[in-house]
Amino acid sequence: MEKNAKIYVAGHRGMVGSAIVRELERQGYTNIITRTHKELDLCRQDAVEKFFAEERPEYVFLAAAKVGGIVANQSALADFMYDNMILEMNVIHSAWQNGCKKLEFLGSSCIYPRMAPQPMKESCLLTSELEKTNEAYALAKISGLKYCEFLNRQYGTDYISVMPTNLYGPNDNYHPTHSHVLPALIRRLHEAKEQKLPYVTCWGDGSPLREFLYVDDLANLCVFLMNNYSGNETVNAGTGKELTIKELTELVAKVIGYEGEIHWDTSKPNGTPRKLLDVSKAASLGWTYKTELQDGIRLSYEDFLNNPMRAER
């Protein structure tokens, strides 16, 4: 990408989109286009078509999505599928119609089968059934990356996709029921510390294994791939390291300074037992992550403390 190229970041107010904007600015890109949801509803096809016809961005980072944790996914299956499919199809199709040079689609590691061989290679996509608790979101993301692949194959476009592992960092969503596990733990353990609670209760038994990537590291990879990768197969974004939810909870408690007990409610679902990405493809292209988990959690907690309104989203 040329430093003055017109670059549209869809979802620039979200955690991923805002990190991509920061990374682009850090690297000296000067012509970044953004629109708030109020200015442009990406679920409205006519509005998206009008925007692309008028602006004609040369490069697109598609980081906009309707996201949430287990509770949100299970309670709004239809909403998650519809909103994400409509949004991504509108943006990808309009980018193609208006001659976009390159588009990068941001997905999620939940696209891979529930019992995929670990660590999960890009090639295991669609080899067996998905995890039921986020099936709707996964199907929408699979549709987006496949549409990029099919446009490449039919029309010779240069559209790529990247599949991040669990993300965290500045501008995360700390909502008590609609957030992902790490920001949810930051909020709950902070409140427990403030209220001097003797214990907190977490869902499941703490045994699932998870991998976490600091969002600014993902943004660095996204810009790297836009400049260095073309291909129909997606690229995994992760650290290649994992820990149990129990270990994660204890690490968050350590960073926050909560000294109470952690109890586990085994009547609640665990979710996928293990989700570790094979990151050898990104490594072979010359990229690796920079931020270790404890350092990233500390930075995230500082962000949470400095931006209290985010906790209310």
Image (cartoon, grey):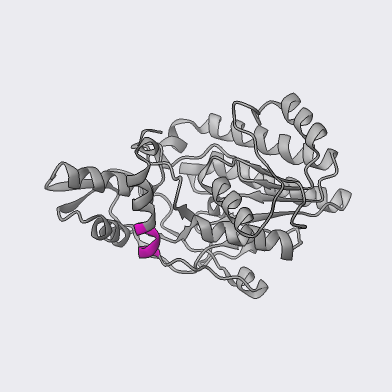
**Whole-percent x and y of residue 56?**
81, 39
Q: Which residue is the extreme one toward the right?
A: 155
| Residue for point 60% across, 49% down | 21
Give the vertical position of 81 relative to 23 (above or below): above
Query: Which quadrant holds residue 184?
Result: top left
Residue 79 x/y as whole percent: 54, 29
Stretch of the chain drawn in magenta: 293-298
Asked whether residue 126 appears in the rendered view, the answer is no
Rendered location of residue 278, percent (x, y): 55, 68
Does the magenta run of residues contain 296? yes
- The image shows residue 233 at horizontal and vertical percentages of 71, 60
Q: Is residue 143 left or right of residue 110?
A: right
Please name the predominant secondary structure of the magenta segment in the image.
Answer: helix
Q: What residue is shown at x 31% (from left), y 49% (from top)?
A: 186
* Residue ID at (59%, 51%): 20
Q: Which residue is nearer to you in this view: 182 or 22? A: 22
Residue drawn where x is 51% and y is 33% of the image? 77
| Left or right placement of residue 196 versus residue 185 in this view | left
Viewer-closest of 63 and 69 = 63
In which image quadrant can residue 251 be found? bottom left
